[in-house]
Image (cartoon, grey):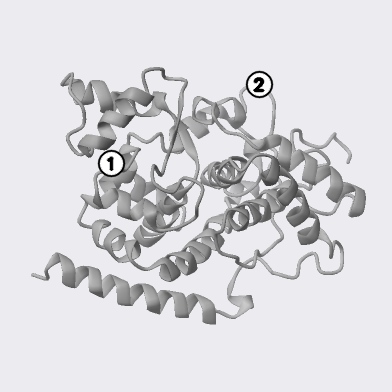
Amino acid sequence: MKSFSSTATLLYATAFFLVAFVSALPFDDIDLPFDYYSLSCPKLEEIVHNKMEEWVKKDYTLAPALMRLHFHDCVVRGCDASILLDHEGSEKSAKASKTLRGFEVIEDIKREVERVCPRTVSCADILTVAARDATLAVGGPFWMVPYGRKDGTVSYAKEADQLVPTGHEVVTDLLELFQSKGLNVLDLVVLSGAHTIGRTTCESLQYRLYNYNGTRKSDSRLDHLYLNYLERKCRWASEYVDLDAVTPKKFDVQYYKNLQKGMGLLLTDQLLYSDPRTAPIVTALATQPDVFENLFAASMVKLGNIQDYLSVDGEVRLSCASVNSPGY
């Protein structure tokens, strides 16, 4: 049987191979084209980039918020902007969506895009490229975004509550979800690295601090000093705490180093370092920032390409919060 370290070495080599493989892919091997708006809206990326700079300069927490908003959208019905629909019983009203932010940023971008390129660019495409530029704004990697998504017309809160991870799942649950969306174990660990920035409410982790599994004790996997900090910080459920306690405003591999020290804030994060399917990848990425950034870019492209068959016959919404009127 291979040792833990030799397995990590193998995965590290595999990571380099995957980076080279993804970099060498011809554009036409990807379902969505990169030049979809080259004639109809050539200023799209410039508009999104400028708007994102404006918003993140005012509030840097909007960057991870938009990355999370994109993930929530793509997990349910594919990347069709169904999370943006604002009506009774929509995904936006789900329990899983109650801490989502950044809707106003997408609407602001949409208004400017409509002014320059009316009735052309979908909200789904805007959200996808906004997530890319949000990553860039906090020091993350660049990747080319393929375009051509349509906006869905259906959005149900119950679907979001059934599919979106809550932070309480075991690794097998997460792997099954990712595999159902065409993503793999490497994508799971790499995309979880988005938690190198951002924050969450104390409500989502109090059970780990005060009554883990009904024991009236804390989760023993938590580092002692980190636990003491969290117990002081999280007396109130409404308080916010950084997902990365060391470099919360920097897009880096500290997230993976934290997992090795028992400083994974969410249980779903910490379990990545104890499960034999994911722990070697965590070990490899913790010391290879360039590999992490390249793989993160590749996994974000895969995430953004998730298309649900129910959303194929979509539309280009005039407003991201509502479907178009009949006869549009």
Foreground tag (1 vs 2): 1
- Which three-letter amino acid code belongs to the residue tagged 1? Val
Find disc 2 in the rendering and name its residue: 88
- The crowding category of the residue bearing disc 1, from other C-alpha atoms within 10 Å (few below 14, some 14 to 19, many at least 20), is some
Q: Does residue 250 show up?
A: yes
State the residue at coordinates (71%, 49%).
52
Left or right placement of residue 255 versus residue 46 in this view: left
Q: Which image quadrant is residue 40 in?
A: bottom right
| Along the viewing direction, whichever of 260 and 40 lies nearer the viewer | 260
Q: Do the residues labelled 1 and 2 touch (CB within 8 Å)?
A: no
For marks 1 and 2 on the same chain, the one whose residue lies earlier in the sequence: 2
- What residue is disc 1 on? 170
**Kind of residue indicated by mark 2:** Glu
Q: Position of residue 303 (x, y in %)?
A: 53, 56
Relative image position of residue 216 (x, y in whole percent)? 18, 18
Kindly state the secondary structure of the residue where label 1 is placed: loop
Question: From the image, which quarter does the N terminus lie in?
Answer: bottom left
In the rendered image, residue 300, in percent from the top left (x then y), is placed at 53, 59
Identify the residue at image location x=83%, y=41%: 318
Q: In this view, does 100 lie above or below 23?
A: above
**Quadrant of the rendering where the C terminus is positioned:** top right
Q: Give whichever of 138, 121 is nearer the camera.
A: 138
Quadrant in the rendering for residue 50: bottom right
